């Protein structure tokens, strides 16, 4: 049974490591928190907000994200991400997401996830490999 409702939220914290840097991801040449790592943390936080709220057999997949990476964060600094479910339109779930390091706001995003039947989705994925 689903108990989805606008207002669901989650927070996620991480410490920036070398593996998270733009130079490691290939998205830049500097050793600071990369935009791809930020996007991953944002999506993860949206998924966390949904834990325990989806019907049995359902999960979500990301379908769209618009991100502004506002400020650099050095390796070793803590990052906190907050995601809030702001709208439900059928299978589409819309999130507002923000991120901060220990000094300032470093990112913001609008993100859409879509509820799917996991078994049907995976059957379709596996059929592509045949």
Image (spheres, helix red, strand yellow):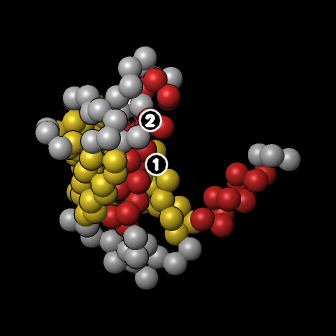
- Residue 39 in the image, given as x and y percentages of width and height: 39, 40
- Please identify the quarter of the rendering in which residue 33 is found: top left
- Please indicate, yes or no, whether residue 42 appears anywhere in the rendered image: no
Q: Is residue 60 above or below residue 32?
A: below
* Numbered disc in front, either 1 or 2: 2
Quarter-of-image position of residue 12: bottom left
Q: Is residue 122 left or right of residue 51?
A: right
Residue at 27 percent of width and 59 percent of height: 11
**Residue located farthest toward the bottom when viewing the structure as drawn:** 1
Q: How many marks?
A: 2
Which corner quadrant holds the N terminus?
A: bottom left
Residue 124 % position (x, y): 71, 54
Density class for disc 2 (Cα within 10 Å; few <14, some 14-19, many ≥20) is some
* Residue 18 numbered tag: 2
> Could you tell whether 1 is left or right of 68 in the image?
right
Viewer-proximal residue, 57 or 37? Answer: 37
Q: Position of residue 30 (x, y in %)?
A: 38, 20
How far is mark 1 from mark 2, CA to CA?
26 Å
Answer with the quarter of the image where residue 118 lies: bottom right
Task: Report the disc number at residue 62.
Answer: 1
Label 1, residues with CA under 10 Å away: few <14, some 14-19, many ≥20: some
* x, y percent for residue 70: 22, 29
Q: Which numbered marker is on residue 14?
A: none
């Amino acid at each position: 049974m689903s108990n989805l409702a606008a207002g669901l939220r989650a927070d996620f914290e991480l410490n920036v490591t070398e593996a998270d840097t733009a130079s490691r991801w290939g998205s830049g040449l500097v050793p600071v928190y990369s935009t791809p790592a930020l996007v991953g943390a944002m999506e993860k936080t949206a998924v966390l907000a949904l834990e325990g709220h989806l019907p049995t057999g359902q999960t979500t997949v990301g379908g769209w994200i618009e991100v502004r990476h506002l400020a650099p964060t050095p390796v070793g600094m803590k990052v906190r991400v907050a995601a809030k479910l702001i709208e439900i339109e059928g299978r589409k779930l819309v999130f507002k997401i923000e991120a901060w390091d220990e000094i300032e706001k470093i990112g913001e995003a609008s993100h859409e996830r879509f509820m799917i039947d996991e078994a049907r989705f995976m059957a379709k994925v596996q059929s592509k490999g045949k």
